Image (cartoon, helix red, strand yellow):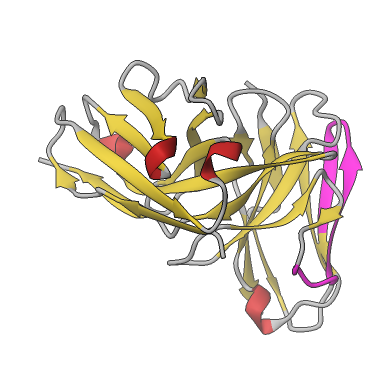
Amino acid sequence: DIQMTQSPSSLSASVGDRVTITCQASQDIKNYLNWYQKKPGTAPKVLIYGASNLETGVPSRFSGSGSGTHFSFTISSLQPEDFATYYCQQFASLPLTFGGGTKVEIK
Amino acid sequence: EVQLVESGGDLIQPDRSLRLSCAASGFTFDEYAMHWVRQAPGKGLEWVSGINYISHVIGYADSVKGRFTISRDNAKNSLHLQMNSLRAEDTAFYYCARDATSISGNYLDSWGRGTLVSVSS
């Protein structure tokens, strides 16, 4: 199975801050890496697919980069509605696996 | 508008069975693979199983292999998860999700709000 290691597991930030989360795959997954946002009581929402493609309707302050085994996800200017948990997920091979999540909290 | 609505979650005793359903609308259901993903209380997301558009099973997580069975009914726009021999560690919110295909790879582009399965004696 491909292990996805996400860091940090949590962070505190202020509105307007730039936030970066990293995700490392245990083997080469090319660019088959997606990022999701999860808020309590709501369905997960895809933000970035294929490592760097912004899903339709997602604000441009969200971005992703990387390939192979190292990936990053950035929120350029944190907004109040962005406080949530973020997950990376590989779609290169079965079983599909998620990172452990990064909880973004208000400082 | 794409809608996925899960149902069937319940409080159930260990070793019993439960069948989850996901009703799909707003898109051509038989053109998409579908998946089940779960989230245990206080834990992260875990992929459970997937099935392609013509009912070929994509796979199961090791944690549910041999106990859970995924299926779909394209005529009724529905996805199912038969869960047997349930364990306490199966306690979670279960989400159905649509598999979108792009030139940059697959991803889960639409999700339901989930149904809660609680396994306890």
Q: Nearer the viewer, residue A3 or A81?
A: A81
* Numbered label tally: 0
Instruction: Please give left or right for residue A67 compared with residue A42 in the image.
Output: right
Q: Which residue is at 41% across, 33% downward?
A: B72
Instruction: Please give left or right for residue A90 compared with residue B97 in the image.
Output: right
**Relative to residue B66, is residue A5 depicted above or below?**
below
Instruction: Please give left or right for residue A78 compared with residue A43 in the image.
Output: right
Is residue B32 visible in the rendered image? The answer is no
- Which residues make up the magenta segment? A57-73
**Quarter of image, res B31:** top right
Q: Nearer the viewer, residue A50 or A9?
A: A50
**Relative to residue B47, is residue A42 depicted above or below?**
below
**Relative to residue B67, is residue B20 depicted above or below?**
below
Horizontal and vertical percent position of residue A40 = 47, 66
Q: Is residue A67 magenta?
A: yes
Q: Which residue is at 21% across, 36% downward?
A: B18
Residue lying farthest front? B75
